């Protein structure tokens, strides 16, 4: 039988190195990250409440995962600026709701220069934006 995981050592928290962004007024705490780093125990930032299937929890991420999330959000914003348009001139969304109507007519792709995406998800969006990957049908 494995021993239970140790709780964060808060006794010596004032002697531990603090994250560079600690002085920005954000809610940093010692604990486990919820994202891509493998749940390491470090300084984590509370991003807000998370919910799934009626369950709620505080959502914490470490600084490297926060940077990755930040770059993904930037990639999404820039992708939507370059989004192709449908026959009605409406920008094609990167996400389609279950109740969304079918897109009218062909999709028109922009011929402008696209900034190189920062993240893997941004690279997938870029393939869609440039027409190298067909958008999913509704």
Image: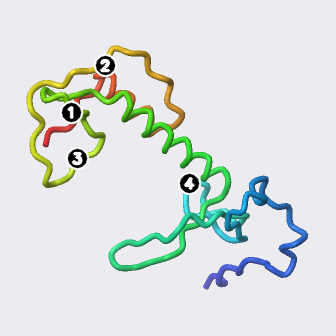
Left or right, 27 with respect to 94, comes to: right
Label located before the other in sequence (2 or 4): 4
Helix, strand, or loop for circle 3? loop
x 68%, y 71%: residue: 31
- Rate crowding at label 2 as few (under 14), some (14 to 19) or many (20 or more) other CA atoms within 10 Å: some
Q: Earlier in the sequence, mark 1 or mark 3?
A: 1
Counting residues from the N terminus, which is met first, the one under dot 2 or under dot 3? Answer: 3
Q: CA distance from mark 1 to mark 4?
A: 34 Å
- Name the one closer to the observer, 65 or 20: 20
Q: Dot 2 lies on which element?
A: loop
Q: Which of the marked residues, 4 or 3, is nearer the chain's N terminus?
A: 4
Q: Position of residue 59 (x, y in %)?
A: 54, 68
Q: Nearer the viewer, mark 2 or mark 3?
A: 2
Q: Which quarter of the rendering shows the N terminus?
A: bottom right
Q: Nearer the viewer, mark 4 or mark 3?
A: 3
Q: Of discs 1 and 2, which sits in the foreground?
A: 1
Q: Residues within 10 Å of mark 4 (few under 14, many from 20)?
A: some
Q: What distance separates the C-alpha of mark 4 from that of mark 3?
A: 25 Å
Quarter occupied by residue 25: bottom right
Mark 4 — residue? 36
Res 110 label: 2
Does residue 37 sit above or below 134 in this rendering?
A: below
Q: Nearer the viewer, residue 103 or 55?
A: 103
> What residue is shown with label 1?
90
The circle drawn on residue 96 is 3
Q: Where's residue 41, x and y in %?
A: 70, 66
Q: CA distance from mark 1 to mark 3?
A: 14 Å
């Amino acid at each position: 039988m494995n021993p239970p995981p140790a709780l964060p050592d808060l006794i010596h928290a004032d002697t531990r190195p603090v994250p560079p962004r600690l002085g920005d007024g954000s809610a940093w705490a010692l604990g486990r990250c919820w994202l891509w780093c493998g749940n390491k125990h470090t300084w984590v930032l509370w991003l807000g409440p998370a919910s799934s299937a009626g369950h709620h929890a505080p959502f914490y991420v470490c600084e490297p995962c926060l940077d990755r999330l930040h770059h993904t959000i930037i990639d999404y914003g820039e992708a939507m600026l370059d989004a192709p348009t449908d026959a009605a001139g409406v920008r094609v969304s990167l996400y389609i709701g279950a109740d969304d109507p079918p897109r009218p007519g062909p999709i028109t792709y922009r011929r402008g220069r696209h900034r190189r995406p920062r993240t893997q998800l941004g690279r997938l969006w870029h393939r869609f934006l440039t027409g190298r990957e067909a958008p999913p049908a509704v």
